[in-house]
């Protein structure tokens, strides 16, 4: 691209193939509450402190976590002068999230990262992860989480939301619970039904979308992100209920994955 | 280790390395092709712990004005904090830029594909192959892994048939009819690390790369022709040592070619 001298230059602009190929097919009807088969594995990158790979039907996410490391910059919030109580927020650990899409993950090729959408998703990821880790136990430390989306297949935010806490737990940082993410989309009228875990086609044609992040054991909501056309409140409430059920159903797989990773690490330890 | 260099020297004296390998031995190489559905061609290569994934996306673009019958091949190596805590997120750092330029040189020098094959209509439309190599785990020897991943992914790429409609002068893509690229040569990279100005070891891990006094990468194709030699500074090498490296590279090429042929033979036609 013009001006970017750090990368190999290609043509000024290029069009994806699909622009010439015409419309795709309509999504096939299916059971609205079906979950796609999930494959999860933790502890697979040797260079990262903790890592997790999650494949949920279409989307493939790899998440790595490094730290806790000494935080850069001084303490936030200063100290309260003379008072007996300290501000706990200034001393607790910080979580930095980075979300990127591989350029080959979407339908067309995305330009190398830095776009606004990725920052928004990174922020959503951070907000959902903060309640999970016991950051108060790691004062002045910094935990860096990077999520990489290798293949998009719908539900681009739900998969990292599930993989990141798995990576966090794999590091050995104390957490209250795992987080499970689920995404839903509402098809446009005339049949506005909420579909769990939409495929890419369903997501593209959706009138509204919702991503929920639930901590299944504590039964607390870690994150909620919705967008699209408005609708009656009952419709959104029903969507949330559907999402939470989906999360609860996914939880045993992730728990098993976490336990297996711990066993593997325990077996490898006495070298 | 407190004294990593001394620790290594003790092993090197016995002609072996801490992970049990000989000086001329490569780590276990595994390759997996075609796993990313959204890419036109993809591959995943593991060299021990070093993991690189390559995804190729083909798009349409206008050919360059100074070469109207050629397409583009645009490589990009991405080293992110995911693969090693040494890297920061943001624009490509030095190591990533060096690796991207190295891959571009390999493509150009080895003529792995003829850019003329990528042209659809001279001066108007050509294929642009964006090759994105993402390192998932950096445990040394990125260049070998990237070259191998690129080769495997290029062999996996299937491009649809494109015809130019004469009346409308627009391209028509037939997604049902796809064909593989014409891969002319198979360049394979072999990297060495130089220790104490004299000792050469093959396929360095990240620790070995740090302790080395120099590195060297030799790229050979199947007819024993040298495509690319990459020696970024470091300690000098005598002519005879260089010859040894090249013969080792030729042997490595045979090993890699055998692995790739096995993989592609075992793949069921789509």
Image: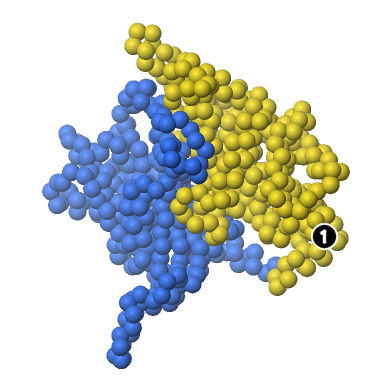
Chain colours: A blue, B yellow
Say what secondary structure mark 1 lies in. helix
Q: Nearer the viewer, residue A166 or B120?
A: B120
Q: Quadrant of residue A112?
A: top left
* Residue in the image at 80% along x and 64% along y: B9
Q: Quadrant of the N terminus of chain B?
A: bottom right
Which residue position holds label 1?
Answer: B12
Q: Please provide percent x and percent y for residue A51.
A: 51, 58
- Is residue A40 something that shows in the picture? no
Quadrant housing residue B15: bottom right
Q: Is residue A113 above or below residue A251?
A: above
What residue is at 46 percent from the left and 38 percent from the top? A104
Left or right: residue A230 compared with residue B229? left
Q: Residues within 10 Å of mark 1 (few under 14, many from 20)?
A: some
Q: In the displayed structure, would residue A253 be above or below residue B74?
A: below
Q: Position of residue B192 (x, y in %)?
A: 74, 48
Q: Residue at x 41, y 13 (%)?
A: B164
Rendered view: B151 above or below B7: above
> Farthest residue in the top direction?
B167
Count of marks, rendered view: 1
| Outermost residue toward the left in this view | A232
Q: Position of residue B84 (x, y in %)?
A: 56, 57
Kindly identify which chain the residue marked by label 1 belongs to: B
Residue B93 seen in this snapshot: yes
Residue name at image x 34 percent, y 22 percent: A22
Nearer-the-camera pick, B217 or B270: B217
- Viewer-closest of A244 and A16: A16
């Amino acid at each position: 691209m013009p001006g970017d001298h750090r990368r190999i230059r290609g043509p000024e602009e290029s069009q994806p193939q699909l622009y010439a190929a015409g419309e795709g097919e309509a999504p096939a009807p299916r059971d609205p509450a079906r979950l796609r088969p999930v494959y999860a594995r933790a502890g697979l990158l040797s260079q990262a402190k903790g890592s997790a790979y999650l494949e949920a039907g279409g989307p493939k996410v790899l998440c790595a976590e490094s730290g806790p490391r000494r935080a850069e910059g001084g303490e936030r919030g200063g100290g309260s002068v003379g008072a007996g109580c300290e501000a706990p927020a200034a001393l607790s650990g910080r979580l930095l999230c980075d979300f990127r899409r591989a350029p080959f993950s979407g339908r067309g090729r995305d330009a190398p990262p830095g776009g606004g959408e990725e920052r928004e998703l990174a922020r959503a990821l951070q907000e959902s992860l903060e309640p999970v880790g016991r950051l108060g136990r790691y004062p002045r430390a910094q935990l860096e989480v990077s999520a990489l989306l290798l293949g998009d297949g719908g539900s681009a935010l739900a998969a990292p939301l599930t993989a990141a806490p798995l990576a966090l737990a794999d590091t050995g940082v104390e957490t209250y619970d795992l987080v499970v993410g689920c995404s839903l989309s509402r098809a446009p009228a005339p049949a506005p039904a909420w579909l769990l875990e939409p495929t890419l086609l369903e997501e593209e044609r959706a009138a509204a979308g919702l991503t929920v992040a639930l901590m299944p054991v504590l039964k607390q909501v870690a994150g909620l992100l919705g967008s699209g056309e408005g609708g009656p409140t009952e419709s959104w409430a029903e969507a949330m209920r559907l999402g939470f059920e989906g999360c609860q159903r996914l939880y045993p797989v992730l728990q098993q994955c976490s336990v297996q990773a711990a066993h593997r690490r325990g077996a490898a330890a006495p070298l | 280790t407190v004294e990593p260099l001394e620790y290594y020297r003790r092993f090197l004296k016995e002609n072996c390395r801490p992970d049990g390998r000989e000086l001329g031995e490569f780590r276990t190489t595994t390759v997996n092709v075609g796993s990313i559905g959204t890419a036109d061609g993809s591959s995943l290569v593991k060299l021990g712990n070093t993991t690189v994934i390559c995804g190729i996306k083909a798009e349409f673009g206008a050919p360059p004005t100074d070469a109207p019958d050629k397409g583009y091949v645009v490589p990009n190596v991405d080293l992110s904090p995911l693969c090693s805590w040494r890297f920061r997120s943001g624009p490509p750092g030095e190591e990533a830029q060096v690796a991207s330029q190295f891959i571009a040189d390999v493509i150009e020098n080895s003529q792995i594909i003829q850019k003329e094959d990528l042209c659809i209509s001279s001066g108007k439309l050509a294929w642009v192959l964006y090759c994105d190599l993402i390192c998932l785990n950096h445990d040394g020897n990125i260049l070998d892994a990237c070259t191998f991943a690129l080769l495997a992914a290029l062999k996996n790429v299937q491009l649809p048939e494109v015809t130019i409609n004469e009346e409308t002068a627009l391209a028509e893509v037939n997604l049902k009819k796809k064909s593989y690229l014409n891969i002319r040569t198979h360049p394979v990279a072999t990297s060495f690390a130089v220790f104490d100005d004299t000792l050469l070891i093959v396929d360095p891990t990240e620790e070995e790369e740090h302790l080395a006094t120099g590195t060297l990468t030799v790229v050979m194709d199947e007819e024993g022709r040298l495509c690319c030699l990459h020696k970024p500074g470091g300690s000098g090498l005598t002519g005879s040592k260089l010859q040894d490296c090249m013969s080792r590279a030729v042997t490595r090429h045979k090993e890699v070619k055998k692995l790739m042929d096995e993989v592609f033979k075992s793949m069921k036609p789509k």
